[in-house]
Image: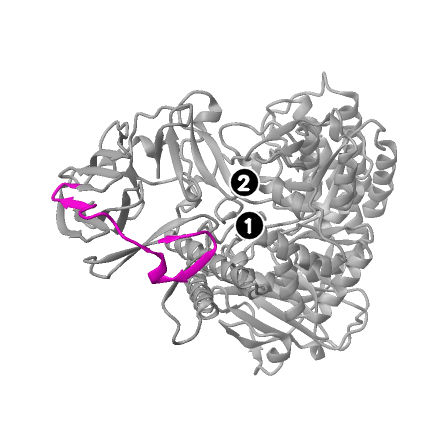
């Protein structure tokens, strides 16, 4: 009977839509820089003959619909069918009304309107949708624009029957393990012998429904299906699936920032419309940066969103300005994302967000609970931990204790991501995988096509209604995220605890991808901190918040990791460099005592340091002893080195605190610091090259096997410079890495610090290859210590348990240190 039942689904679906008229359209051209509606109406529009291919990737285009061609059609009950490979936002009388994309093809039009305009983006981005096709070689293809009517009876019957069919397929998985319920009916089907009573009864009722369709049409089938839902009402002892409308918008990723802003308007318009159609629908969205874009691009739509927020139907949830990467920003910059974000949330809803919402991020710093507690955030939601590829994360709901002891409540989806569509399979999977269901009867299901895919759909809302109370399935209802966490908090004392960073065993390559971006990002962080330190020292006020906002934007989890398209960095790196230069210029101007003031030096750090200032040719240098967060005329700070304190020979460097011997390959064969020799396993600073062909996500991953296939660089190093002055000694080598790539190596010591300075200037021309500098030591502690925002973390450096194996490649923020188990002796880089 199952093949007969399954084949009935497309039979019904073909009865839903009826085309009543094709609509002529005119095209106003495509532009690289996006313009708003007020500017677009000034375009010159010319007739477009379908199929119509237009634009280049990321271009914006505007279309006008000629409704004068269909004057005889009544406007009541009409739907607009828009089928473009790219995305479109329907404007009704100048206001964003609905978003078209691969998951949103039909929009019911209001009973009264004067003008229909569509803003389009040449980008096909709902990558998780089964009907996603990508773009044509010449651009985006608009293939259909028509007015339709919906057969509401067929619509209702289709969703009734489709949901029950999905439930039947879930039961088949239980009663017939190994059988693929999606089979087309060809071949052997096991007899219905030993099965659950529920499966047997549901199979019979659906077969009855098909009989009713064959004999009594759609109305007969509807009557039968309503009886089925009544018969199979849900049970009292079951889990609850709380749906939150979700549309994870990557501000940048496979598109630049201007496209991300378009996506915010596109998605917000759809969510707003769904609230008219489905009063029970609830929608949550994070990222104040997107709200600001919508307010700027469409104030009318933003006012509608503000009304929904007041009605408690739309939930600004998230705490941070953008969904930030949490590992690569410094602690201060990460905290800024919370501080700026929470101020924006106060303006949006009158109060800060109590929930940190970062479903898609590549690891979770151990300082997050501390920052959350200090900014009014009690709860945290994510899904990405389920992507760990060696160890399954042990908890769904738990208390997370940060590295300072701060605690927050966390909920993680298990076996489902953030692109859920209210399928019976997803709902049951969420229930079965909920690790804490013994103490809490509710799990959260973010619902809608994310990653820029347009968010929830009418079909999802229809399925949610039918799964609200159905036997064998969890109860399903829309809800608010903060309410869900408040209910979870009631059983907090029964939840497990987890301390320290939440390490993601995936996307390990993002910590090194696009090194030029990471360099500019870190320089901008330092420049902004320097400007703020100057203000603090002078007793001044806050610096320009816009500068912080733009740096925070670069924290977005597909920006700073280097996982976006090249155009993002072509635009972003120069902007970061301008911010850094602007900030340092202002720091100097504000600290300066005027044109005739003596040259002074300012230390923006909270600890004392020795500053070495070298001439461009390296033949002279000065040293300055700087107190924390203070400055003075340079002459007053200068310190002198003992005579002949530093020395550079052809193969060695020495200072009062450091002695380094360099071999013919340009490696450090012996290193002594403060009289103690580093316990080396071999020369330090050798290079090794690995073939880099990840099985997925080329810019994001480093596969375990890659690190077993290294080839040492055997070439000799050529000494090209030997510089010595009163303060510093330096040796400079050139070395060929491959036929196409080379490196300049600088080793330097100074008269004051217990540090061997190592600088590499690498001309890297080899694709799909990974270069590492190796510092092998005998320090065999169980763990290595890595710098992290607001602290440090210990990660495994020895083989053994699966948890250790999962950390085969582990990058740190600012430094890493290998030591013995007491952490009293070791080497830091």
Q: How many numbered discs sit on the rendered protein?
A: 2
Of mark 2 and mark 1, the one earlier in the sequence is 1
Position of residue 561 in the picture relative to residue 352 (left or right): left
Q: Position of residue 336 (x, y in %)?
A: 58, 54
Q: Is residue 827 above or below residue 176?
A: below
As helix, strand or loop, the secondary structure at mark 1 comes to helix
Give residue 334's mark. 1
Q: Which residues are magenta?
A: 625-652
Q: Quadrant of the N terminus?
A: top right
Q: Residues within 10 Å of mark 2 (few under 14, many from 20)?
A: many
Q: Which of the two residues, 424 or 333, is positioned nearer the viewer here?
A: 333
Separation of residues labelled 2 and 1 (CA atoms)? 10 Å
Give residue 365's mark. 2
Residue 650: say if magenta.
yes
Query: Would you say residue 160 is visible in this rendering?
Result: no
**Residues under numbered marks 2 and 1 in contact, where contact means CB atoms less than 8 Å apart:** yes
Query: Would you say residue 134 is visible in this rendering?
Result: yes
Q: Which of the two residues, 205 or 588, is positioned nearer the viewer here?
A: 588
Q: Residues within 10 Å of mark 1 (few under 14, many from 20)?
A: many
Q: Position of residue 240 (x, y in %)?
A: 78, 35
Q: Residue at the spot x=77%, y=24% of the render?
A: 200
Q: Residue at the spot x=55%, y=52% of the render?
A: 132
Residue 387: say if magenta.
no
Q: Is residue 351 above or below residue 501?
A: below
């Amino acid at each position: 009977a199952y093949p007969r039942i399954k084949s009935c689904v497309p039979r019904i679906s073909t009865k839903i839509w009826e085309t009543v008229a094709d609509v002529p359209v005119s095209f106003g051209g495509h532009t690289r820089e996006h313009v708003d509606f007020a500017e677009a109406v000034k375009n010159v529009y010319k007739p477009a003959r379908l199929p119509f291919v237009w634009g280049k990737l990321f271009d914006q285009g505007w279309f006008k619909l000629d409704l004068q061609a269909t004057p005889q059609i009544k406007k009541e009950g009409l739907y607009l069918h828009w089928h473009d490979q790219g995305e479109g936002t329907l404007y009704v009388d100048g206001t964003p009304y609905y978003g078209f994309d691969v998951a949103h093809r039909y929009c019911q039009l209001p009973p009264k309107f004067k003008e229909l305009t569509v803003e389009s983006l040449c980008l096909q981005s709902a990558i998780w949708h089964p009907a996603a096709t990508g773009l044509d070689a010449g651009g985006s293809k608009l293939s259909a624009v028509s007015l339709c009517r919906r057969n509401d009876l067929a619509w209702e019957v289709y969703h009734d029957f489709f949901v029950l069919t999905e439930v039947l397929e879930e039961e088949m998985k239980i009663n017939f393990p190994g059988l693929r319920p999606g089979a087309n009916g060809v071949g052997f089907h096991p007899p219905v012998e030993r099965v659950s009573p529920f499966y047997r009864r549901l199979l019979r009722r659906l077969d009855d429904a098909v009989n009713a369709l064959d004999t009594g049409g759609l109305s007969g089938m509807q009557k039968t299906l309503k009886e089925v839902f009544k018969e199979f009402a849900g049970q009292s002892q079951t889990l609850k699936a709380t749906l939150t409308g979700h549309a994870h918008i990557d501000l940048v990723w496979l598109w630049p920032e201007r496209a991300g802003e378009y996506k915010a308007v596109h998605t917000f318009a759809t969510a707003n419309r769904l609230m008219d159609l489905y009063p029970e629908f609830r929608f949550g969205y994070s990222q104040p940066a997107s709200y600001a874009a919508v307010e700027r691009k469409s104030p009318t739509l933003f006012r509608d969103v503000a009304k929904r927020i007041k009605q408690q139907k739309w939930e600004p949830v998230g705490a941070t300005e953008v969904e930030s990467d949490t590992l690569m920003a410094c602690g201060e910059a990460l905290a800024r994302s919370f501080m700026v974000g929470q101020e924006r949330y106060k303006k949006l809803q009158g109060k800060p967000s109590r929930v940190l919402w970062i479903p898609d991020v590549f690891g979770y710093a151990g300082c997050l609970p501390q920052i959350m507690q200090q900014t009014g955030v009690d709860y945290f939601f994510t899904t990405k931990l389920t992507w760990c590829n060696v160890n399954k994360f042990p908890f769904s709901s738990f208390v997370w204790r940060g590295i300072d002891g701060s605690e927050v409540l966390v909920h993680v989806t298990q076996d489902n991501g953030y692109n859920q569509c209210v399928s019976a399979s997803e709902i049951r999977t969420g229930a079965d995988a909920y690790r804490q269901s013994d103490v809490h009867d509710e799990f959260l299901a973010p619902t809608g096509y994310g990653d820029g895919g347009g968010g929830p759909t009418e079909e999802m809302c229809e399925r949610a209604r039918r799964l609200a109370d159905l036997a064998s399935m969890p109860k399903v209802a829309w809800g608010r995220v903060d309410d869900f966490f408040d209910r979870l908090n009631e059983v907090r004392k029964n939840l497990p605890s987890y301390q320290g960073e939440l390490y993601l065993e995936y996307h390990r390559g993002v910590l090194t991808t696009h090194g030029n971006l990471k360099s500019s990002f870190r320089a901008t962080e330092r420049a902004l901190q320097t400007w703020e330190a100057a203000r603090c020292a002078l007793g001044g006020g806050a610096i320009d918040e816009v500068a912080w906002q733009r740096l925070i934007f670069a924290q977005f989890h597909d920006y700073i990791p280097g996982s976006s398209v090249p155009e993002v960095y072509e635009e972003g790196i120069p902007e970061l460099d301008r911010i850094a230069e602007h900030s340092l210029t202002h720091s100097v101007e504000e600290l300066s005592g005027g044109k005739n003031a003596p040259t002074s030096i300012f230390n923006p750090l909270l600890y004392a340091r020795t500053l070495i200032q070298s001439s461009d040719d390296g033949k002279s240098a000065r040293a300055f002893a700087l107190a924390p967060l203070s400055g003075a005329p340079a002459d007053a700070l200068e310190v002198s080195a003992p005579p002949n304190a530093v020395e550079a020979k052809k193969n060695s460097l020495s200072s009062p605190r450091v002695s380094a011997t360099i071999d013919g390959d340009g490696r450090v064969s012996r290193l002594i610091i403060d009289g103690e020799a580093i316990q080396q396993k071999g020369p330090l600073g050798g290079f090794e090259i690995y073939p880099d062909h990840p099985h997925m996500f080329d810019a994001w991953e480093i596969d375990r096997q890659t690190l077993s296939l290294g080839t040492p660089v055997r070439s000799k190093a050529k000494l090209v410079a030997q510089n010595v002055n009163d303060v510093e000694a330096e040796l400079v080598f050139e070395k060929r890495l491959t036929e196409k790539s080379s490196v300049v190596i600088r080793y330097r010591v100074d008269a004051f610090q217990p540090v061997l300075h190592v600088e590499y200037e690498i001309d890297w021309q080899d694709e799909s290859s990974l270069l590492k500098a190796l510092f092998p030591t005998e320090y065999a502690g169980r763990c290595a210590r890595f710098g992290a925002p607001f602290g440090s973390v210990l990660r495994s450096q020895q083989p053994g348990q699966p948890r250790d194996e999962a950390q085969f490649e582990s990058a740190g923020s600012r430094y890493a240190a290998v030591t013995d188990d007491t952490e009293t002796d070791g080497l830091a880089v």
